[in-house]
């Protein structure tokens, strides 16, 4: 499955099949959350959160691709990501784009 964040595939004609999305909600690990709180006192990257959001993006992409494959898509174009806090200690990540069929 070709994944692009542009709205076309260079040199190819495509037919749009529809919008696809993948979503996940990830929560923080209490032990890592405590250590991250300590890190926020001195500054710098909070690696536990970086890893949590990276994992969430991977899951969201996998779910989006599964939805596109079920539609018979060859690619997803115009991919975007969105994230938000849904409750204390949990973040939602959404990946979405347009599933397309490559015609030539």
Image (cartoon, rainbow, N blue to C red):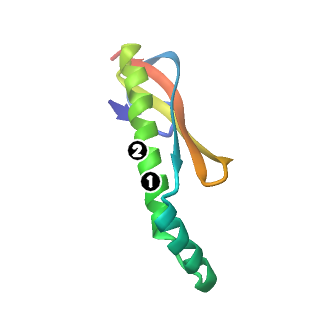
Instruction: Tell me the SS state at disc 1.
Output: helix
Which residue occupies 51% across, 47% down? 26
Examine the rendered structure and indicate whether residue 59 appears above or below residue 33. above
Residue of label 1: 54
Q: Residues within 10 Å of mark 1 (few under 14, many from 20)?
A: few
**Frontmost residue, 72 versus 26:** 26
Q: Residue furthest front?
A: 30
Residue 57 location, x and y as percent?
A: 46, 46
**Residue 67 occupies quadrant:** top left
Examine the rendered structure and indicate whether residue 19 appears above or below residue 60. above
* Residue 12 visible, this angle: no
Quadrant showing the C terminus = top left
Which residue occupies 36% across, 20% down? 69
Residue of label 2: 58
**Frontmost residue, 59 versus 100:** 59
Instruction: Tell me the SS state at disc 2.
Output: helix
């Amino acid at each position: 499955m070709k994944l692009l964040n542009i709205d076309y595939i260079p040199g190819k004609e495509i037919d749009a099949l529809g919008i696809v999305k993948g979503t996940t909600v990830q929560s923080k690990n209490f032990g890592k959350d405590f250590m991250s709180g300590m890190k926020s006192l001195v500054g710098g990257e909070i690696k536990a959160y970086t890893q949590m959001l990276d994992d969430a993006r991977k899951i969201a992409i996998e779910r989006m691709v599964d939805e596109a494959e079920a539609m018979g898509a060859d690619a997803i174009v115009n991919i975007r990501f969105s994230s938000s806090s849904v409750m204390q200690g949990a973040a939602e990540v959404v990946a979405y784009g347009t599933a397309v069929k490559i015609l030539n």
